[in-house]
Image (cartoon, rainbow, N blue to C red):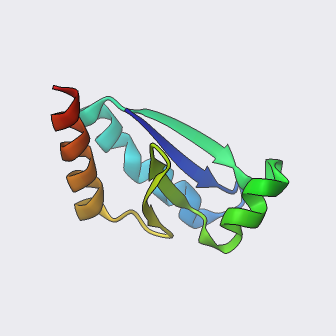
Amino acid sequence: MKLTLYFREYCSLCHAMRDALLPWQARYGFELSVLDVDDDPVLEARYNELVPALEIDGEPICHWYLDEARLAAVLAAKAGEIR
């Protein structure tokens, strides 16, 4: 599984979400790709005020704050697909 976190280096909410994902990553073993939206004009236009934004396989999970209930449901569903 690969999750993508759309991020800004100067964004405290972004850093908080990235840090909050670490125990989830240890438990579920997903790959986490962190993309700084300021490095790509297309990403900046798409995610501008929505960062941090978390997606799995292009599907949104949450933005601004980590929605742990939604993340747990998505990861459980994906883990069931893999088995």
The answer to which quarter of the image holds residue 66 is: bottom left
Q: In which quarter of the image is the N terminus?
A: top left
Q: Residue at x 77, y 65 (%)?
A: 45
Give residue 40's position: percent from left, percent from top: 81, 49
Q: Residue at x 34, y 37 (%)?
A: 25
- Residue pictured at 31% horizontal, 29% vertical: 29
Query: Along the line of sight, which residue is nearer the eye, 76 or 12?
Result: 76
Q: Where is residue 41 in the image (x, y as percent from the top left)?
A: 84, 55
Name the side, left or right, on which 57 lies relative to 27: right
Q: In this view, does 43 lie to the left or right of 23?
A: right
List the single residue furthest toward the bottom: 49
Measured as percent of width and height from the top left, residue 55 is found at 47, 52
| Location of the C terminus (image quadrant) | top left
**Can you give x and y, in whole percent of width and height, for residue 18 in the image?**
49, 50
Relative to 63, does residue 41 appear above or below in the rendering?
Answer: above
Decide which of 74, 11 is in the foreground and name it.
Answer: 74
| Count of numbered marks | 0
Residue at the image position 33 percent from the left and 65 percent from the top: 67
Whether residue 35 sits left or right of residue 83 in the image: it is right
Query: Outermost residue, top direction?
Result: 83
